[in-house]
Image (cartoon, grey):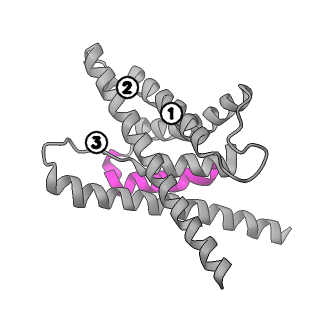
């Protein structure tokens, strides 16, 4: 039993640390690159949203368990990025929406007969992109339809905003995938030689 608890704690710590590191990298990229070269871009608009990619990969690995594993780290990262004064019920709802839509997208694909794992632990990267697209479109649609700030937007402006959200999510997913593929390739070479 103690061994099981240690393994659970290790998974919680690993998933949380991975998510926090990706959030810190995203915040540093926004601060270093976008604020230096793109001062006209409003705060909160990321060209690349890496935490979505991290969440999709963690969801692929953990399934629905990603919700309790990542929720504390997601809340902590939101407070760190936006400050405690911006932490309200709307932010918690948005986080829960993201955390639930990712496993939901995997479940929807599995119900449709397409499994991202293909019955093994190897990842089908193309299917993961499609699952990420479904999750991102779902998140963007729900956020833009029900959020108070989007009620004043016209149809084309709302569509443009939703498209921007989906693009930044998908860019984040592709960059995290690329980074992990690179890390796994380096690890394979390192341990194959040594």
Give the crowd class for mark 3: few <14, some 14-19, many >=20 residues within 10 Å: some
Q: Is residue 151 left or right of residue 38?
A: right
The mark nearer the N terminus, 3 or 2, is 3
Secondary structure beneath dot 3 equals loop
Cα gap from disc 1 to disc 2, whole angstroms: 21 Å
Q: Quadrant of residue 152?
A: top left
Pointer 1 or 2: first along the chain: 1
39 up-or-down from 16: above or below: above
Q: Is residue 74 magenta?
A: yes
Q: Is residue 54 left or right of residue 37?
A: right
Residue indicated by mark 3: 45
Which residue is tagged 1? Answer: 133
- Residue lying at the far front in this picture: please name it: 193
Q: Residues within 10 Å of mark 1 (few under 14, many from 20)?
A: some
Pick whichever, 72 or 111, lies toward us: 111
Quadrant where the N terminus sits is bottom right
Crowd rating for badge 2 (residues with CA inside 10 Å; few <14, some 14–19, many 20+): few
Residue 135: percent from left, percent from top: 53, 33
The answer to whether the residue labelled 3 contacts the one labelled 1, judged by CB atoms less than 8 Å apart, is no
Residue topped by disc 2? 147
Vertical side of 61 occupied by 143: above or below: above
- Please say if the residues under marks 3 and 2 sit with CB atoms less than 8 Å apart: no
As helix, strand or loop, the secondary structure at mark 2 comes to loop
Between discs 3 and 1, the one toward the N terminus: 3
In percent of width and height, residue 151 lies at 30, 18
Along the line of sight, which residue is nearer the eye, 135 or 74?
Answer: 135
Q: Nearer the viewer, residue 176 or 190?
A: 190
What range is drawn magenta here? 65-86
- Residue plotted at (31% across, 61% down): 28
Establish if 134 lies above or below 116: above
């Amino acid at each position: 039993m103690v061994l099981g608890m240690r393994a659970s704690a290790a998974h919680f710590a690993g998933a949380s640390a991975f998510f926090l590191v990706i959030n810190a990298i995203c915040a540093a990229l926004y601060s270093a690159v976008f604020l230096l070269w793109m001062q006209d871009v409003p705060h909160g608009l990321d060209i690349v949203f890496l935490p979505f990619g991290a969440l999709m990969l963690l969801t692929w690995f953990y399934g629905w368990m990603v919700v309790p594993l990542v929720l504390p780290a997601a809340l902590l990262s939101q407070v760190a990025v936006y400050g405690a004064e911006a932490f309200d019920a709307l932010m918690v709802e948005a986080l829960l929406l993201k955390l639930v839509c990712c496993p939901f997208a995997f479940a929807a694909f599995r119900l449709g007969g397409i499994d991202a794992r293909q019955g093994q632990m190897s990842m089908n990267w193309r299917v993961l992109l499609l699952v990420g697209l479904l999750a991102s479109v779902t998140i963007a649609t729900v956020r833009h339809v029900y959020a108070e700030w989007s009620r004043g937007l016209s149809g084309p402006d709302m569509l443009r905003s939703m498209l921007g959200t989906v693009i930044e999510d998908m860019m984040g997913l592709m960059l995290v995938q690329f980074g992990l593929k690179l890390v796994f390739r380096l690890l394979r070479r390192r341990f194959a030689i040594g």
